[in-house]
Image (cartoon, grey):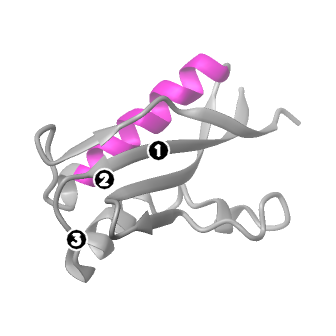
Amino acid sequence: MGNYVITVPGTVRRPMDERARRALLAVVHGADPEEVGAEVPDLDVLTLDEPEGTFVLRLEVEAADRGAAGEAASDLARRALAAAGYDGDTAAIGTPAVTGIDTG
C-alpha cells in the first residue's frame, strides 16, 4: 500500500457557488494534499476555472497500486460532486493522473 496524489480533471455544466464548493470540500477533507505536510505543500485541493467550467481536484488516497488509486480518487470525486449537488448531467470527470507517490 502507498499514498498517491491523484489529479482528477473535470467539467461542471453550471456555476459552482460557495455552498456547493464548501460541500464538495467537506467530502474530500482528509484527502487534501495540504494535510500531508511537506509532501505536496503548495497544492490546492480544488482549482476551478469559472468561465470555462473546468476544474481539477488533487486528492491523496491510499491504494495498492496506480490503478486502484485512480479508481479511489474518481470515486471520491464523484461522491464530492454529488454532495455539492452535481450529478452525471451537470458534471463530468476525466481520466485521473498520478502526480505523486509515497510508498514508504
Q: Earlier in the sequence, mark 3 or mark 2?
A: 3
Between 57 and 35, the one lying in front of the other is 57
Identify the image quadrant of the C terminus. top right
Give the alpha-carbon distance from disc 3 to disc 2, as whole Å: 10 Å
Q: Secondary structure at mark 2?
A: helix
Q: Secondary structure at mark 3?
A: helix
Main secondary structure of the magenta stretch: helix
Give the alpha-carbon distance from disc 2 to disc 1, as whole Å: 13 Å
Q: In the picture shown, does residue 12 fall above or below 20?
A: above
Q: In the picture shown, does residue 63 fall above or below 49?
A: above
Q: Earlier in the sequence, mark 3 or mark 1?
A: 1
Say which residue appears at 48% left-offset and 64% top-offset: 46
Between 29 and 59, the one lying in front of the other is 59
Say which residue appears at 58% left-offset and 28% top-offset: 69
Image: magenta residue range:
66-81
Can residue 76 be found in the magenta stretch?
yes
Along the horizontal axis of the image, is 60 left or right of 23? Answer: right
Q: Amino acid at mark 1?
A: Pro
Residues at circles 3 and 2 in contact by the CB criterion of under 8 Å: no
Residue identified by numbered label 2: 80
Identify the image quadrant of the N terminus. top right
Residue identified by numbered label 1: 9
Along the horizontal axis of the image, is 84 left or right of 48? Answer: left
Give the alpha-carbon distance from disc 3 to disc 1, as whole Å: 17 Å
Residue identified by numbered label 3: 20
In this rendering, the label closer to the viewer, 2 or 1: 1
Say which residue appears at 35% left-offset and 60% top-offset: 52
Along the horizontal axis of the image, is 53 left or right of 104? Answer: left
